[in-house]
Amino acid sequence: MRIPKMRRNDPSKKDVAGWNRLVEVLTRVQQQGDPAFTTSVFRQALLEMFRRQQSLKFSYPVPPRVSLELALDISAEFLEERSGGDRAQALAGALFDAIGVHFALFAQVNRARINASDEATGQAADLECLDETGKLILAVEVKDRTVSLADVEGILHKSRQRHITEILFTSKGSRPEDQAAIQDRVSRAFTAGQNVYIFDFFELARSVLALGGESIRITFLKKVGEHLDTWNTQPRHRQAWQKLLQKL
């Protein structure tokens, strides 16, 4: 659960009533201590999740034309609500998908669920950009915060094991106190044969979505919706993207 303790009436939860029901179910499971009961509860939970997902369908009305500023504005508004990185990864995944489609730099862009570690998925980074032969040519780490020195060290270590030489971060820049150390580490990595690039997401998106013209902006907006649906992002995030598109 990534929390130190599960307790009723947790004020940090948006849906306190729903949270209390979850606590009650898990408490009952623990009290019963019966594998058959636990299995039945787990299966019922999966079934209810499936039914809920099936009932929540969202359409994403992308207009036939959209300006660069509008595309960036709704993306920035979309990122205003915290999502544990889900929204940032949908935007970054969509941007690199669009790059692959319009500039033919990648044949495929792979990504994993936001709450799965790279070790668990076997991926080198949040996004893997592959060529026509399936070779990984660019590893992309997606951060909805600033990049730390520890982030850079971590991706360098993983990439070195996979013999990946091109590594890119999309983020909100780097922390001022880390900038000198990060630049030094990036320079040393270059000497050792690894290229590390750190971009503010919107600086990168502005250049890409301008160079590709209107067609790449349409692709980008459509791909955001595809990522949100494909990875079963929480309904409130999908609904938020739908409402933003409806304003265009």
Image (cartoon, grey):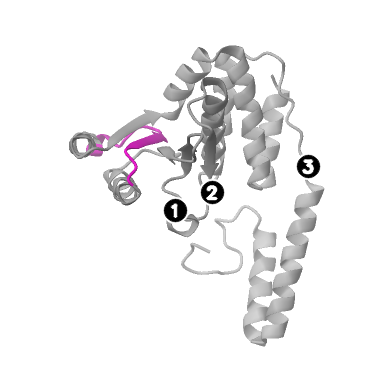
Of labels 2 and 3, earlier in sequence is 3
Q: What's the residue at 43%, 57% (across, down)?
A: 119
Residue at the spot of label 1:
118
Q: Quadrant of residue 23?
A: bottom right
* Residue for badge 3: 57
Going from N to C along the chain, the mark reached first, 1 or 3, is 3
Residue 204 numbered mark, or none: none
Which of the 4 image quarters holds residue 239?
Answer: top right
Q: Front-most of 176 and 150?
A: 150
- Image x and y of residue 229, in percent: 68, 42
Can I make out residue 79 in this image? no
Residue 34, given in percent of the width and then of the height, sits at 67, 87
Q: Earlier in the sequence, mark 1 or mark 2?
A: 2
Outermost front residue: 133
User: Which marked residue is nearer to the observer: mark 1 or mark 3?
Assistant: 1
Distance in Å between CA atoms under marks 1 and 2: 8 Å
Q: Which residues are magenta?
A: 163-178
Mark 2 = which residue? 112
Does residue 164 show up magenta in the picture? Answer: yes
Q: Which three-letter amino acid code belongs to the residue tagged 2? A: Ala
Dot 1 and dot 2 residues touching (CB under 8 Å): yes
CA distance for labels 2 and 3: 22 Å
Task: Classify mark 1: helix, strand or loop.
Answer: helix
